[in-house]
Image (cartoon, rainbow, N blue to C red):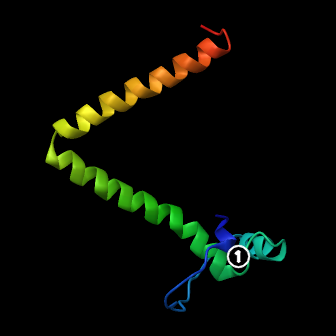
């Protein structure tokens, strides 16, 4: 789903942030061009990838601390064999082997 079509549910809190003039000019240019609905919209979409990265790193650290997982190892082996079989079938269908 396009980010502009995703509904926002929840409260929002207004904050004041000091930014260099050129940063504000860039944000405003994105708003005036229609790339962002507002300064707040631009800021939210800029923060979301960092938030996802933070949580992914946290989750990776949790999984790394748990050590090897035999069930997951078996799944990865099975999935990779299955993927390889699909690739081989596609190559064969187009005589690309």
Q: Quadrant of residue 51?
A: bottom left
Side (left or right) of 23 relative to 72? right
Few, some or many C-alpha atoms within 10 Å of disc 1 (few <14, some 14-19, many ≥20)?
few
Q: Nearer the viewer, residue 17 or 81?
A: 81
Q: Residue at x 56, y 83 (%)?
A: 17
- Which element carries disc 1, helix, strand or loop? helix
Residue 52: horizontal and vertical position, in percent? 45, 61
Side (left or right) of 69 relative to 82? left
Residue 5: horizontal and vertical position, in percent? 68, 73
Q: Quadrant of residue 38?
A: bottom right
Q: Residue at x 25, y 39 (%)?
A: 72
Residue 54: horizontal and vertical position, in percent? 39, 61
Quadrant for the C terminus, please.
top right
User: Residue furthest toward the right?
Assistant: 33
Q: Nearer the viewer, residue 74 or 46?
A: 74
Side (left or right) of 33 relative to 84? right
Q: Nearer the viewer, residue 28 or 8?
A: 8
Q: Nearer the viewer, residue 31 or 10?
A: 10
Q: Residue at x 49, y 91 (%)?
A: 11
Q: Residue at x 62, y 73 (%)?
A: 6
Residue 19: horizontal and vertical position, in percent? 61, 77
- How many numbered markers are drawn? 1
Side (left or right) of 12 relative to 31? left
Quadrant for the N terminus, please.
bottom right
Q: Is residue 19 above or below residue 66?
A: below
Residue that mark 1 sits on:
24
């Amino acid at each position: 789903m396009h980010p502009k079509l995703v509904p926002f549910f929840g409260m929002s809190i207004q904050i004041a942030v000091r930014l260099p003039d050129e940063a504000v000019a860039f944000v405003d240019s994105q708003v005036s061009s229609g790339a962002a609905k507002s300064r707040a919209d631009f800021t939210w979409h800029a923060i979301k990838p960092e938030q996802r990265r933070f949580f992914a790193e946290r989750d990776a650290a949790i999984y790394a601390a748990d050590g090897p997982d035999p069930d997951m190892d078996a799944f990865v082996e099975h999935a990779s064999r299955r993927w390889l079989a699909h690739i081989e079938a596609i190559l064969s269908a187009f005589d690309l082997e």
